[in-house]
Amino acid sequence: MKSMFKTTVLLAALTGLLVIIGSFWGPGGMAIAFIFAIIMNFGSYWFSDKIVLAMYHAKEVTEAEFPNLYRVVRGLTYKASLPMPKVYIVESPMANAFATGRNPEHAAVAVTTGIMQILTPEELEGVLAHELAHVSNRDTLISATAATIAGVITMIASMAQWAAIFGGFGGRDDNDNSGGIIGFLVLVLIAPIAATIIQLAISRSREFVADESGAKMCGKPRALANALGKLHRSADISAANGRAADINPSTAHMMIVNPLRGSALMSLFSTHPPTEERIARLNRMI
């Protein structure tokens, strides 16, 4: 409940940023900002799953092709009282997994061939439970909404900068235009960064919840903790070998571990909480 309240506050903060940017263009600017948000949210609600699955060339597989994978997913969905999602395989040596879909009735879980090679059956069950927890908690829709609003803010801020440069700064009287435009430019430079930080904070918060919910779903917190450790090390190896270039940064927040590594200074912009902290929390559940 506490985590959902935090998520709601962060989503409200994103919306507030959108309103503030639009207000610099007056009521008309606010209306345009909301129209952009509505259109992009509509698109993300209905098509985000198809876009992501196509992006990674994910292939829907049958139970006959992957009986063990289906058995685990079906067992977990039965425990969680969830509809059976579609199951996809991504042909990639990178070890990762993600879930997508606007609701449990239209959900999909995808695993890479790489993750199936390095995890034990129990560890893979823990990972799939984590992903199904995202589905159960509606995180797939929350993350898509947050990413869309943040994207709208960045796009409008960029348009506003060009409009200000070419004299399109509206919604202010000429008398205070010189002072207003300075504040406006500061805002449009800072707002995209703030929006990104808020979006990533939402993602990190939901990862902790999915870890806890997934561990309870499968009843094996140690298996999930061990899987996270293996996946973290695998991501480091992939990054060192240049395989992380295959990951689109806009979808990195969907993966169970962050496939894009950065320096310690970039931790603020991480899509995931520290793996060590996630493992420590899971170990406390044992």
Image (cartoon, grey):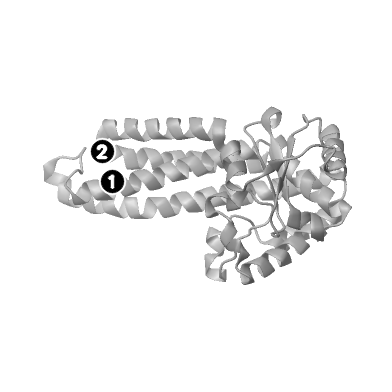
Q: In what quadrant of the picture does the C terminus appear?
A: bottom right
Which element is circle 2 on? loop
User: In the picture shown, does residue 100 fall above or below 285?
Assistant: above
Q: Residue at x 53, y 65 (%)?
A: 266
Q: As shown in the figure, which amino acid type bears the numbered disc 2?
A: Trp
**Label 2 or label 1, whichever comes before in sequence order:** 2
Mark-to-mark CA distance, 2 and 1: 9 Å
* Residue at (85% x, 38% y) in the render: 64
Dot 2 surroundings within 10 Å: few (below 14), some, or many (20 or more)?
many
Query: Where residue 228 sits in the image (x, y, percent)?
Result: 76, 59
**Which label sits on residue 160?**
1
Is residue 285 at all visible to an observer of this figure? no
User: What quarter of the picture does the N terminus occupy?
Assistant: top right
Residue at x 53% of width, y 50% of height: 250
Q: Position of residue 257 (x, y in %)?
A: 68, 56
- For the residues labelled 2 and 1, say whether their Cβ atoms are less than 8 Å apart: yes
Of the two numbered discs 2 and 1 in the rendering, the one whose residue sits closer to the viewer: 1
Name the one closer to the observer, 273 or 113.
113
Question: Residue 262 lies in what quarter of the image?
Answer: bottom right
Per the rendering, the mark at residue 25 is: 2
- Using the rendered view, name the quadrant where residue 16 is placed: top left
> Position of 191 compared to 49: left or right?
left
Residue lying furthest left: 175
The spot of residue 165 in percent (x, y) is 20, 51
Q: Where is residue 267 in the image (x, y as percent from the top left)?
A: 56, 64
Determine whether the residue tagged by mark 1 lies in a helix, strand or loop: helix
Inspect this view and state whether residue 3 appears.
yes
Instruction: Say whether residue 51 is left or right of residue 69.
Output: left
Disc 1 residue type? Ala
Q: Residues within 10 Å of mark 1 (few under 14, many from 20)?
A: many
Asked whether 109 or 207 is in front, the reply is 109
